[in-house]
Amino acid sequence: MKNLILLIASLLLFKVSTAQTAFPPQYLSLVQKADSLYDAKAYKESAFTYSEAFKGNAWKAKTNDRYNAACSWSVAGYADSAFSNLMLIANDGSYINYAHIIIDSDLIPLHNSSRWLVLLKLVKANEDKVEATL
């Protein structure tokens, strides 16, 4: 039941955060391209395409797109860029899915870094804050 509530809260938070900002077609097109590159296992190209989308939108991005970019960077072997994207969405409180981040196989390359535990604490705190309001 707790997980269902968290899922609903996450979806509502995501919907509210994306509804407030209109994203230009160029951004959406590049994100779609980055997703396709990820699906084709072209992780490095996917990661750079996400960055191109973010740069073209004054570095503003949807939480889910930042997370997906981090996955691409991680699998491509660029831990610093992966952490950069993850810390942005953890620090602003928009990423709250602790149960997912700890099992996401794309992020396994990050687990040995001291930054991983810091990130997890932030995400858990975000999740706890949302739970407290339910």
Image (cartoon, rainbow, N blue to C red):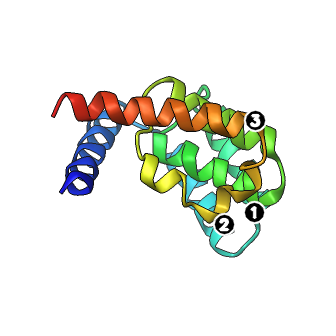
Residue lying at 58% horizontally and 29% vertically, measured from the top left: 88
Tell me: 98 left or right of 5.
right
**Picture quadrant of residue 76:** bottom right
> Is 77 positioned to the left or the right of 75 in the image?
right
The answer, for residue 94, to whether it is visible in the render is no
- Labels 3 and 2: the sequence-earlier one: 2
- State which mark lies toward you, 3 or 2: 3
CB atoms of marks 3 and 1 within 8 Å:
no
Neighbours of disc 1 within 10 Å: few (<14), some (14-19), many (20+)? many
Corner quadrant of residue 95: top left
Residue 38: numbered disc: 2
Q: Residue at x 66, y 55 (%)?
A: 107
Q: Is residue 90 visible?
A: yes
The CA distance from mark 2 to mark 1 is 5 Å
Any mark on residue 43, and which?
1
The percent position of residue 58, horizontal first and vertical second, equals: 60, 25
